[in-house]
């Protein structure tokens, strides 16, 4: 805590005994709203960052790609179909 924060806390501690129950409840509800909004902002910031996947050297990859790495190719493809898919991919890539 900074010196200013400690000073504000001290002033608040000195003021609390003079407040009514309704006033204390109002102050508490306002403080609770501030804390909740701060937590939501923190969660939004964390959601913006792509997740790290430690199984793949800490690289950030999509869950779909991680599933392919883990389970392999789940499609039943013959060797001829695979070669044709490779050829189509390479011809499209190097047009």
Image (cartoon, rainbow, N blue to C red):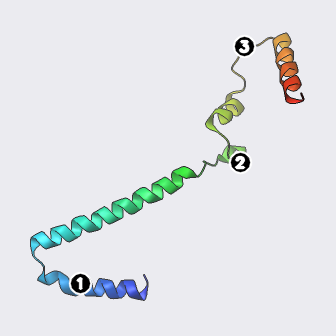
Q: Position of residue 75 (x, y in %)?
A: 70, 17
Q: Position of residue 83 (x, y in %)?
A: 87, 16
Please identify the quadrant where the N terminus is shown: bottom left
Q: Badge 2 is on which residue?
A: 59
Residue 76 numbered tag: 3
* Residue occupying the point 30% across, 62% down: 33
Q: Position of residue 79 (x, y in %)?
A: 84, 13
Q: Badge 1 is on which residue?
A: 13
Precedes in sequence: disc 3 or disc 1: 1
Label 1: few (<14), some (14–19) or many (≥20) C-alpha neighbours in 10 Å: few
- Residue 69 relative to residue 90: left or right: left
Q: Secondary structure at mark 2?
A: loop
Looking at the image, residue 73 lies above or below residue 21: above
Label 3 to label 1: alpha-carbon separation? 70 Å
* Residue occupying the point 68% across, 32% down: 70
Label 3: few (<14), some (14–19) or many (≥20) C-alpha neighbours in 10 Å: few
Looking at the image, residue 47 lies above or below residue 10: above
Label 2 to label 3: alpha-carbon separation? 28 Å
Looking at the image, residue 3 lies above or below residue 57: below
Precedes in sequence: disc 2 or disc 3: 2
């Amino acid at each position: 805590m900074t010196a200013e924060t400690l000073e504000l806390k001290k002033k608040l501690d000195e003021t609390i005994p003079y407040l009514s129950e309704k006033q204390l409840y109002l102050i508490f509800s306002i403080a609770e709203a501030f804390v909740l909004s701060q937590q939501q902002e923190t969660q939004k910031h964390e959601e913006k960052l792509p997740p790290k996947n430690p199984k793949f050297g800490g690289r950030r990859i999509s869950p779909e790609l991680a599933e392919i790495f883990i389970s392999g190719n789940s499609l039943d493809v013959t060797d001829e179909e695979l070669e044709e898919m490779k050829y189509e991919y390479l011809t499209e890539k190097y047009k």
